[in-house]
Image (cartoon, rainbow, N blue to C red):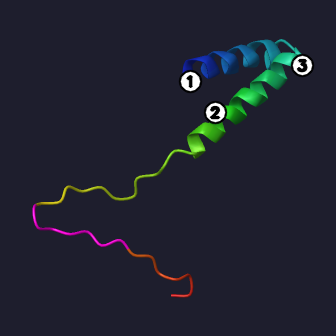
Amino acid sequence: MERGLSYLIKRAFREGLLGGSRGWAIVGVVAVAVRWIRRSNKPVIVYSTELSRGQTLVISQRSPGG
């Protein structure tokens, strides 16, 4: 799907912004929005390590006040 979005964005830039086609400009805005939403939903890895046998990992959350 990413290749399809890339194609639409490139074509919309050429036809819409450079060529003056309002329809292609709208397609470009929608395609960029879809790409942005898809990328923003991916989880962010903050820390990664390999645990040895016997090691433990504690995950905790502090309250916003401290």
The numbered mark at residue 22 is 3
Per the image, label 2 sits on a secondary structure element best described as helix
Residue that lies at the very extreme toward the front in this rendered image: 54
How far is mark 2 from mark 3, CA to CA?
20 Å
Residue at image position (35%, 71%) is 59
Residue at image position (76%, 29%) is 30
Q: Position of 15 compared to 8: left or right? A: right
Residue at image position (15%, 68%) is 55
- Quadrant in which the N terminus is drawn: top right
Do residues under tags 2 and 1 come within 8 Å of each other at their CB atoms? yes
Residue 4 picture quarter: top right
Residue 65 picture quarter: bottom right
N-term mark: 1 or 3: 1
Per the image, label 3 sits on a secondary structure element best described as helix
Tag 1 residue? 2
Is the residue marked by circle 3 packed among few (<14), some (14-19), or many (20+) residues within 10 Å?
Answer: few
Give the amino acid at mark 2: Arg
Of helix, strand and loop, which mostly describes the magenta segment? Answer: loop
Is the residue marked by circle 2 packed among few (<14), some (14-19), or many (20+) residues within 10 Å?
Answer: some
Tag 2 residue? 35
